[in-house]
Image: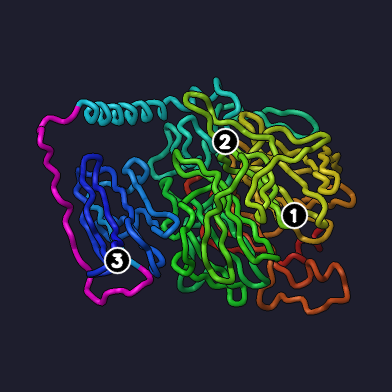
Amino acid sequence: MDDFGVYAVFGVNGPPQKLLSAEGSSRVRVAVPPSVRQVVLFSSGRWGERICVNAELSDSDRMPITIGKLTPYNKCLSWEQWEEETWIDSVTLNVSLEGGNLSTEPEVIMAVKEYTPKDTAAPPAARELHGKRKREQTAEEEEGNDWTKRREEEENTCPNATTEKTTPVRKVRGQAKGSQKLFASGAETTKLKGAGGKAEMQGTVGRTPPQSAVRTKSRQAKAPTHTAPLASPSGRWGQTLCPIDAQTAILIGGQGARMQFCKDPMWKLCTEDVSWVAAETLAEGPTPEARIGHTAIYDPDSRRIFVFGGSKNKKWFNDVHILDTQSWKWTMVEAQGKVPPLAYHSCSMFQGELFVLGGVFPRPNPEPDGCSDSLYIFDPRLSIWYQPIVTGDKPSSRSGHSACVMQERKIYVFGGWDTPVCYNDMYMLDLGLMEFSAVKTTGNPPSPRSWHGSAVLSDTKFLIHGGYNGNNALSDAFVFDIDTNSWTEVSAPELSVPRAGHSIITMETAGHRCFSEEDEDADMNGGRTLLVFGGGDNEGNFYSDLTTVAVEELLGAI
């Protein structure tokens, strides 16, 4: 007997309502009453050959508010109105089944069953619960109004981690209605700590530098160069862009305008014709929940992408999701060992293991969120987290920093933020000795920053571009040479737009291929292209452009 079924509970007092069963339609649409503020979806019974149940909450215009999947490994989903800003009225739950012997019956439209308790008086516990939630929301709104005043009194709070543990995009008091700040700046005085000491910068909270000729054009014109002709990702910041072969990269997650998590969270980029393909429905299995500040790293040996951490509103993640790029199937790892929920950390791949450094972690209210200085390693073969014994002079606590693996034996860590201090120092982790050391650099270094982009250009050089300094998004670019420990500022018109929280990778693109194998340097940079995607400018603009620069052009500018 096939006892499979999919059920939903609408509201805290509602009874389970059967939406799908082994017999009948494989698709159902339910109008959610305006009074309902919580929806729980779950399955019961044997899954058999069924693959997944796709679920989507959409608004009155049929635009997705949030999406999710039930699978044999993830049998329950829940949504609450306070988590989704666009969930106001007239929302619809759309549920469809994939796999198994699907029925050809048409989609069923259902209504939520009315629930009338025997005792018309609400139970005291329920009254207290609703009253408490309302009071908490009111308190949070008041807390937000006084947020900038309290930031001077807080310690160890990153600008992306407010006392409400939300993501960093929020409006600043007194800001124009149509403008949205990408980052929230704490005090009017932001301390900037460089390798050579400390400096103080006085300025208006959230002020940006004078606009260049590129930026004085309309906001729509701020997406220069290559954008896919037919379909492309929405504007966002805090996403990951992960190359999986010479001509393909996978975009995951991010957050866009009005603090909304992207409804198109996954895309595949093909650099042969610089085109995008929506990839959310291409992969099977339990997809990661929408998030920001996570990391995604590709292991070429196993041909898998590892997604770790991040945050979504008041949720913090320490989960590991794996996407097998051969079978296009997601799995969620049940890892052993302990690792805290982290966001805006760095993650590097070395000999098949993930090296996770720093990041923001939540603390119980009313304490501010903290920054980590710890190194955690995840071993996928054993599905275990562990902390290695590390010696030397290690970096201080920070988030929003960058980490570049050089010559398969060193990780270079640059910059980052630990409120109220922003850094431009450099540290190197010797992966053979597991020893940290501070790097004494020469030349003109980048100013203190976090949420900048970084990419390896050759065996001995990597790039730092843009970022956020506590007040402004930046547009400058620098190349670091590990042989001479020297910085060189480089200029490229394609990199002139200030942005932070963007993604930078290097790949081959059409017309810029390298076919020579005689020269070692040509292997790394000849025919390779730097691709810059997304980010924001702290003035309410979130980019969806894909900008390209030849790597040899950047190296030639040194």
Residue 435, placed above or below residue 541: above
Circle 2 SS class: strand
Mark yes or no: residue 64 visible. Answer: yes
Q: Decide if residue 59 is on the left or right side of residue 363.
A: left
Q: How is the model colour-coded?
A: rainbow
Q: Decide if residue 268 is on the left or right side of residue 257.
A: right
Q: Identify the amino acid type marked 2.
A: Phe
Q: Residues within 10 Å of mark 1 (few under 14, many from 20)?
A: some
Q: Decide if residue 181 is on the left or right side of residue 25.
A: right
User: Of label 1 and label 2, which has the lower sequence position?
Assistant: 1
User: Of label 3 and label 2, which has the lower sequence position?
Assistant: 3
Q: Which residue is mark 3?
A: 2
Q: Residues within 10 Å of mark 3 (few under 14, many from 20)?
A: few
Circle 1 SS class: strand
Residue 387, placed above or below residue 320: above
Q: Which residue is mark 1?
A: 350
Q: Which residue is mark 2?
A: 361
* Among the 4 quarters of the image, the one containing residue 26: bottom left
How far apart, in angstroms, are the residues tagged by discs 1 and 3?
47 Å
Q: Decide if residue 479 is on the left or right side of residue 343.
A: right
